[in-house]
Image: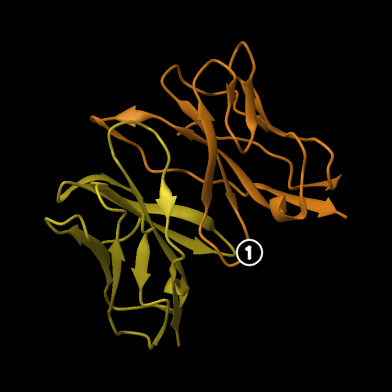
Amino acid sequence: DAKTTQPNSMESNEEEPVHLPCNHSTISGTDYIHWYRQLPSQGPEYVIHGLTSNVNNRMASLAIAEDRKSSTLILHRATLRDAAVYYCILRGLRGGGADGLTFGKGTHLIIQP
Amino acid sequence: KAGVTQTPRYLIKTRGQQVTLSCSPISGHRSVSWYQQTPGQGLQFLFEYFSETQRNKGNFPGRFSGRQFSNSRSEMNVSTLELGDSALYLCASSSGTNPGELFFGEGSRLTVL
């Protein structure tokens, strides 16, 4: 399975944008890039996913490099509730169904008030 | 729309016993997947069921098994429990039709003494 590399932790200030990087140099052509986050004592929560083009939703934006070997999750205006572990995951298609998610260590995002 | 429900939320077992965990997916979702989360190994994929059939399987021993019922509810079973099986077991549901988002439950925390 293609792996992802993320910084162990990042710190940002409240109400400022946050850019969370992810490297996935061995990504295959059919791998989707997914982001999930996990708040303390909760299950992971879906944030966003994309294949080739940049994506936006109400939670965040996903910027995908042209060669797809890296991507960046952008939180436009961080709040204290965004403090969580953020996972960048590659998810392919196999046998007509989706692969299970392979979670790495993720990035622990700390938001300072 | 009710979320993913996992029962029990907490349980304590002793080595050698077996345990069954239950997961009720979001109404209409046909795919249920299971994950194990430990501090040392992080989140690891166990298996995925779709329409009562196991569609994908992670790298866990045969002591870990699962099944899915016709109403999409799923159970996972761990036999001959070991201390290392102590973990948070997470269930996630999805429509199963494309690599879209997974909806996670809050998990079942198993402690093996």
Query: Residue drawn 55% across and 63% down?
Result: A42
Q: How is the image coloured?
A: by chain
Q: Position of residue B78 (x, y in %)?
A: 29, 71
The answer to whether A3 is drawn above or below residue B62 in the figure is above
Q: Residue at x 41, y 20 (%)?
A: A30
Please give the count of numbered marks on the rendered protein.
1
Label 1: element kind: loop
Give percent across and percent down for residue A39.
62, 58
Looking at the image, is A57 positioned above or below residue B20? above
| Residue B57 spot, x, y in % from top left | 29, 48
Q: Chain B is shown in which shade?
A: yellow
- Residue at 57 percent of width and 31 percent of height: A57
Q: Which chain is orange?
A: A
Image point (28%, 62%), residue name: B24
- Would you say A58 lies left or right of A79 here? left
Tell me which corner region of the image, top left, top right, bottom left or bottom right, holds residue A41.
bottom right
Residue beneath disc 1: A40
Q: Amino acid at mark 1?
A: Pro
Q: Would you say A92 lies left or right of A48 here? A: left
Please tell me whether residue A99 is drawn above or below residue A52 in the rendered image: below
Query: Percent x, y for residue A49?
Result: 51, 31
Quarter of the image with the N terminus of chain B is bottom left
Say whether residue B61 is left or right of residue B41.
Answer: left
- On what subunit does the disc labeled 1 rest? A
Binning the other alpha carbons within 10 Å of mark 1 as few (below 14), some (14 to 19) or many (20 upward) gives few
Residue furthest to the top in view is: A66
User: Position of B79 compared to B46: left or right?
Assistant: left
